Image (cartoon, coloured by chain):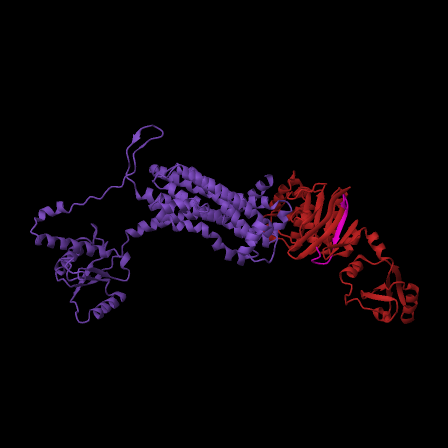
Amino acid sequence: MRKIIVLFKREYIAAVKTRSFIISLVLVPVLMAGSLIVTLLTENNENTDDKSFAVIDHSGLIEDYLAEQAEQRNSNDIYSETGEKVSPAYLLDFLEPDYDEPFKQKLKISDKIRGKKYHALIEIGKDILHPGDSTEEDYLRFYSEHGFMDDTRYWFSNNINNYLRELRLKELNLDPEMTSVLFAWHNIESMGLAKVDEKTGETKDAKESSELQTFLIPYVVVILMFMMTLMSAVPLLVSVMEEKSEKIAEVLLGKLTPFQFMAGKVMGGIGVGLTVAGVYIFGAIATVNFLDVGDIVPMDILVWFFIYLFFYIIMVGSAMAALGAMCNDNKDAQSLQFPAMFPVILPIFFIVPIISNPTGTLATTLAFIPPFTPTIMMIRIATPVTIPTWQPIVGLVGVILFTLFTVWAGARIFRTAILIQGQKPSLSNLVKYAFKS
Amino acid sequence: MNIIELNNITKTFGSVVAVKDLSLTVPKGSIYGFIGPNGSGKTTTIRMIMKIFYPDSGEIKIHGNHRNGIVTDNIGYLPEDRGLYKKMKVNDILMFMGELGGGSDLRTKIRYWLNKLDLATFSEKKVETLSKGMTQKLQFIATIINEPEIIILDEPFSGLDPVNAEILKDVILDLQKKGSTIIFSTHDMGMAEKMCDNIFMIYKGEKVLDGTLYEIQDRYGADTLVVQTEKGESALTGIRGISKINNYGKLQELKLEDRADPQKILAEIMKNTAIKKFEITRPSLNDIFIRIAAPDRKEVNHA
């Protein structure tokens, strides 16, 4: 154990005392905060250049209303109280539909949009007032280069639909006074559950559940786990490869058994991972407490987070060290890095479906596949949904058993491969070294 | 008393037999030289002693202990392929290696060895800033920092200039005097002849020589003449009784055929040229090495 600790100490200091580590430790939160600040700044920094829109109204009903609304908007809404222009004016160009060559007309307008003469084309179907009468002609379309991300379409959508509603009410001879009540809409409020305060024993009423709790917390937890693994376990592949290619391995093997060698390196990885996780998590807790929003962070998940992270780094670290031992040079290491990282990356693809349904079959099944358990189980634990208490425990037993297997197989591969030069890292060699050596 | 015992060890890599049925005993306190051509099995044997490789059969005892997987702290090992963490400082790396070996009072020892090998001024420098020779010396210090009982050096003199080789040789002899047992592999036959109490030669995985220099030379008898003549090698051509000539330019080493008479050969040479030196001697270790490893080597002219 003494030798493992000596090597751990070296590995830990070698990793932590570098400028790149300190920079990346500081840089990640700075970048995250920076991107948040940039988003907030750019949110209020709308491009105020006027926008021209081509409008083809096949119904002939909307034109006047839309022109009036645009004029009203341009006079009232685009300047702040101080007279500063804060929003672009909308200039509408109503075009007669070309019934002989409709596509040619659309192409012409599209070219003008590409040439930035128009911002977009709005096409209103002939039967827009009475949808259902015709399946073809009751459309409302917005043609632009970046339609999906373009918020200006909502202005047209809201105005046109409001006006159509008015027209329909008139047709039905309904009192316009009634319309506001008629169309009153209640969004269902998403609430958590009532609970008992563990400290005071008081019953606490349910609180509104937020996007933060539902999505952001599990998302942050899984990204944090991914990052920790990336910073601590994955570099072992290159580090071991370098020790092999630079002939340090044999010098160390004169003092250490291969198992001690690998264990020391993996422990160094654990040290790095826990340091980074500790700094980030306790930094985040201090920040939310400072901002007096501490109760949004579910503290009870932290214990699970650190336990799972601990075993996850050992599991991935042993595998990476073993693979590193099979590499002869940087080229080998580069070609192995992505396939080796694939099991670490894969759970990231499942974040959304698992957050959406943390107790569903997909989430539950994936949570019991040991290489994915730490990440998937943590996503499930971090959501507000209660998962059966036994599941994280059984998942952890699976992770421990699989970690023991990885360490055992990794040590066997490491022992054999670390001094073999010239053999390409291949699956057949991997299996041979693990089970036949 | 034997400190290391190899009993009938065999090691194969795939279809290649690297070491075959090798037995060897290393007496405590001796300097044991391992010689042999490249790829003959020296490093594999050393790695097996270090428990880096396990033999397929046979057993290796160190201090009578033959458990595999145990690296004993009292063995210092300098592998043929040297490697150190380039970004570490000289002091730090020695401290690290010393701690790995379970050493105590390391600061004093580091200061002592750095002074002794003229590296004291580089103690705070990173390894990557050192010259090849300095790195070699640093690696040597890392090997012996705890003054281990057994020191195994694979090609310790390669890459060193004569001055540093001399310093290293003196240190090795000092360590022997203090009680360490030293095994070193080398291609420098002169150094092996001068330093080793015992010499072991391995060729194609098998032991071909083992004993003191005198025992080995005795086996070959006094079948070698060293001559220095005015005409050099050309005066020796065509003389019967000489099986090989090893030409060193200024002097020639002649291997005699079985039952050849040195006196007759002397008379023949004198017919051709004036003789400056004529000595009947036993073959050098270098000559024995060549006879075993390259019996038909072309550079040695048949007379």
Q: Residue at x 59, y 55 (%)?
A: A245
**Magenta span includes B35:** yes
Judge left or right: residue B122 versus residue A98. Answer: right
User: From this viewpoint, which residue is outermost toward the top?
Assistant: A201
Q: Which chain is red?
A: B
Q: Which residues are magenta?
A: B26-41
Judge left or right: residue A376 versus residue B290. Answer: left
Of the pair A435 and A301, the residue shown nearer to us: A435
Q: Where's residue B150, x and y in %?
A: 71, 44
Q: Where's residue B289, x and y in %?
A: 78, 58
Q: Which chain is purple?
A: A
- Residue A211 vs B226, above or below: the answer is above
Q: Residue at x 76, y 46 (%)?
A: B26
Q: Quadrant of residue A221 in the image?
A: top left
Which quadrant of the figure contains the C terminus of chain B? bottom right
Q: Where's residue A367, x and y in %?
A: 41, 44
Q: Quadrant of residue B296 in the image?
A: bottom right
**Magenta span includes A290:** no
Of the pair A307 and A49, the residue shown nearer to us: A307
Q: Residue at x 60, y 54 (%)?
A: A246
Of the pair A179 and B246, the residue shown nearer to us: A179
